[in-house]
Image (cartoon, rainbow, N blue to C red):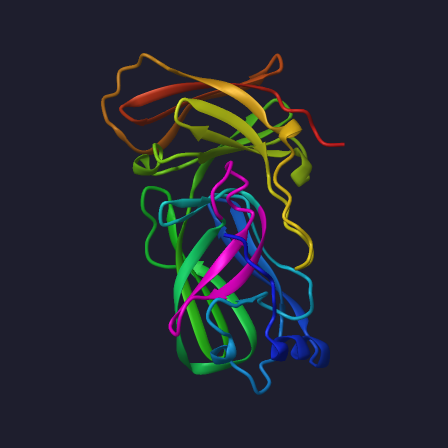
Amino acid sequence: MTVVHCLPFWFVMLSITLPAQKEEATFEWAKRTAKIGYESLPVGQHSLDELKVGAPWRLGASHDASTLQSAMPILVGDRWIAPGAYRITLLRQDATKCVVVADGSHSALGGGEAVQIPGALGKTNKPAKRLAIELGKKGAAVAGNQPAQMVIRFGADEWRGDVLVLGNKTVSVTGGKLAVFTVPTTNLERGAVPIASLVLGKGVADAWNVVLDGDKVRLVPWMQAPKTLEAPVMAPDSAGIVEGTVAPVEATVTTEAEVLELREAALAKGELRLVVAFGAKVLECMLPEPKRGK
């Protein structure tokens, strides 16, 4: 689905006439961070009741994009928001439902439609004077993964959407770090899955997701969010995607793993070797070392 970033007239006028301030909602789990950057718009005399069904809102003031940036995968139902940065908008579905759309999240894994975080739109007893976005825990962690909830408040309107934030095991490899994520075993054979991230530098130009897709594996550069509403979402450059191989490993599995487990990892002689286990399977992934950004 392609979201057309048209704004209701009153939202446009608010961005022109009322001052906004930059805000950031930050969530930390297993020494990794997800954050939402936006401009906090004063409420004024309007509410989300005026947002028409099928219309998106950029979640803030001006034409600068609101963004979701995460260093770990976020699971939404059975779909993935891979590590990277994404422009986000709020899309009205009906009187009581909205979704937060992560533009370009499908491109990070190879196709389909952008991931939508569903949630209910209701009223709060504590109206917010400005747009406020939060990302926090919801309940106890399960097998290293943390249920979380995104909350959006604008005046008396409140939207809540649930996600799962993944844990990881991070190891040092030559020239950087490799984080292998605790992907639930039940999600590992449902299409392309971001099982790990390789970071060889300090910027997103040197960060890749290890994407396992059945009997295929590849390194895909992290997505980068457009800075404005008008800017197009750019898919990862095909020249930066590295294809690898997957092979089963003969091993005795005494206890079937509930989540993906790291067995071995090394980056040597221009090749990344990754051995992981899930359920009753053990797989060896071999990938050429990617070229660093300039």
Answer with the quarter of the image where residue 107 lies.
top right
Q: Is residue 111 magenta?
A: yes
Left or right? Give the position of 142 relative to 16. left
**Is residue 102 within the magenta segment?**
yes
Front position in the image: 203 or 212: 212
Residue placed farthest to the left in the image? 254
- Residue nearest the viewer, comparing 100 with 230: 230
What is the residue that sits farthest to the right in this orientation?
294
Residue 268 sits in quarter? top right
Image coordinates for residue 73, horizontal then vertical, percent:
47, 43
The residue drawn where x is 40% and y is 54% is 163
Q: At which x and y percent is residue 157?
A: 46, 77
Q: Nearer the viewer, residue 33 or 271?
A: 271
Above or below 45: residue 37: above
Asked if residue 271 is positioned above or below residue 78 in the image, the reply reads above
The residue sitting at 42% across, 44% down in the picture is 166
Q: Is residue 43 visible?
A: yes
Q: Which residues are magenta?
A: 85-113
Q: Quadrant of the C terminus?
A: top right
In the rendered image, is residue 180 in sight? Answer: no
The percent coordinates of residue 283 (x first, y second) are 38, 20
- For residue 291, side relative to residue 245 (left or right): right
How far across and down, in percent of the image, does residue 231 sit? 69, 54
Q: Is residue 16 left or right of residue 41?
A: right
Residue at horizontal 25%, vertical 28%? Answer: 256
Q: Residue at x 66, y 50 (%)?
A: 232
